[in-house]
Image (cartoon, rainbow, N blue to C red):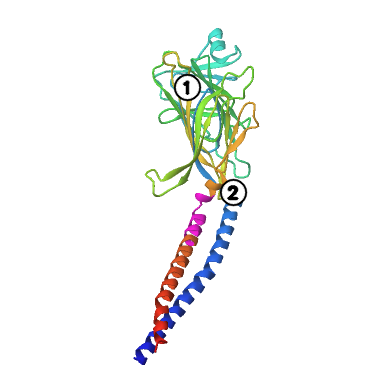
């Protein structure tokens, strides 16, 4: 009997020692985990982070800075090309000789105008000039504007005055290089199909509010996403903001690993239907730390996720949080188990001392 009692006492002592060791280890890890929790949280808030965004806007004005060596292609069928000096091209471009018609289409009698047939398969290639290795990245500014409810005008201006504003291609050959500012005019009156203009480059959407402004942003929405492997589309919405009439948006390139990452998307424009205003429908995607929105009557704001959203969407912070919660739960379980063992062993100790 004494042997059994001695063995039982030894087992209880071993169990208590084992639980004491576990409790000591967990109690040591908990403050370290809390410290890591604080450090990681401050680190996530301090560093800059990029987010995926999506923009949709109805607007009458868009400016795209198309970088060199990107080759964005647009359909030119039915367009009129307005330039200052003659274009060296073949019969695919028909000169408009009537002065009044040139003035109506191009806004000036001094402009030269060339018509592209509606059945033509000509494409305009913007950003075709190779980038120079020893110079800053150049670009061509493409200014989209809807005028008088029936015309879409795209004004192309190369950053380099002697650079290529646009290359004109046929199906299998190049028919002309336009090394001067050019205005592309599409008459959408009576046209029954939409036109699509893919783009890649820094964006400015909407015109500033002023007494003479005619090309404002009408409406839209900005959405910010994070990568999420547990969703159907592989991303989850973090934040969104609705755009108001007269807002202007700036989307610049984001540098990653020394390379610029430009926003990309497309612009759709079509004929007015049912008395509705003729507007451009813009879709854009990219990455950015923040998106600048200028709002009339206010100082404007930069859209970016809140501090809480940045923390809860940070994988390192979420991982440390889960570890800390797990350790705290383990510590609570060990404390409960120790209490049960002590409560179970107390009567036995009392019995051992009985006569």
- Taking 317 as reference, is 275 above or below it? above
Q: CA distance from mark 2 to mark 1?
A: 52 Å
- Mark 1 element type: loop
159 falls in the magenta region: no
Q: Residue at x 47, y 74 (%)?
A: 22
Q: Nearer the viewer, mark 2 or mark 1?
A: 2
**What residue is disc 1 on?**
90
Q: Which labelled disc corresponds to residue 48? A: 2
Q: Position of residue 306 (x, y in %)?
A: 56, 44
Task: Identify the residue at image location x=43%, y=76%.
Answer: 342
Label 1, residues with CA under 10 Å away: few <14, some 14-19, many ≥20: few
Left or right, 333 with respect to 247, comes to left
- Image coordinates of residue 171 in percent, x first then y, are 40, 29
Q: Which of the two discs, 2 and 1, labels the residue nearer the N terminus?
A: 2
Q: Height in image: 301 above or below 153?
A: below
What is the magenta segment's predominant secondary structure? helix
SS category of the residue bearing label 2: loop
Residue 4 horizontal/vertical position (percent): 35, 89
Label 2: few (<14), some (14–19) or many (≥20) C-alpha neighbours in 10 Å:
few
Q: Which residues are magenta?
A: 311-323
Q: Position of residue 158 (x, y in %)?
A: 59, 30
């Amino acid at each position: 009997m004494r042997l059994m009692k001695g063995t039982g006492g030894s087992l209880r002592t071993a169990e208590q020692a084992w639980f004491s060791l576990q409790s000591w280890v967990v109690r040591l890890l908990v403050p370290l985990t809390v410290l890591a929790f604080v450090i990681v949280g401050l680190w996530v808030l301090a560093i800059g982070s990029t987010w995926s965004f999506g923009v949709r806007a109805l607007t009458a004005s868009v400016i795209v800075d198309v970088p060199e060596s990107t080759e964005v292609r647009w359909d030119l069928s039915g367009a009129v090309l307005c330039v200052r000096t003659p274009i060296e091209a073949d019969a695919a471009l028909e000169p408009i000789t009537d002065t009044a018609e040139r003035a109506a289409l191009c806004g000036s009698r001094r402009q030269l105008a060339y018509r592209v047939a509606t059945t033509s398969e000509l494409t305009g290639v913007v950003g075709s000039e190779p980038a120079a290795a020893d110079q800053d990245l150049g670009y061509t500014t493409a200014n989209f504007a809807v005028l008088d409810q029936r015309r879409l005008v795209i004004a192309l201006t190369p950053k380099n005055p002697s650079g290529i504003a646009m290359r004109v291609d046929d199906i299998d050959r190049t028919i002309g290089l336009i090394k001067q500012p050019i205005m592309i005019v599409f008459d959408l009156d009576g046209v029954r199909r939409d036109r699509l203009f893919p783009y890649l480059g820094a964006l400015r959407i909407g015109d500033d509010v002023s007494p003479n402004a005619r090309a404002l942003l009408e409406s839209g929405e900005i959405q910010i996403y994070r990568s999420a492997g547990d969703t159907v589309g592989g991303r989850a919405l973090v934040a969104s903001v609705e755009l108001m009439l007269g807002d202007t948006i700036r989307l610049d390139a984001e540098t990653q690993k020394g390379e610029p990452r430009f926003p990309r998307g497309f612009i759709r424009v079509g004929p007015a239907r049912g008395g509705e205003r003729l507007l451009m429908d813009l879709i854009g995607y990219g990455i950015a730390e923040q998106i600048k929105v200028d709002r009339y009557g206010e100082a404007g704001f930069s859209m970016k996720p809140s501090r809480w959203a940045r923390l809860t969407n940070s994988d390192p912070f979420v991982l440390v949080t889960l570890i800390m919660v797990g350790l705290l739960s383990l510590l609570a379980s060990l404390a409960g188990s120790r209490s049960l063992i002590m409560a179970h062993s107390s009567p036995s100790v009392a019995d051992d001392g009985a006569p």
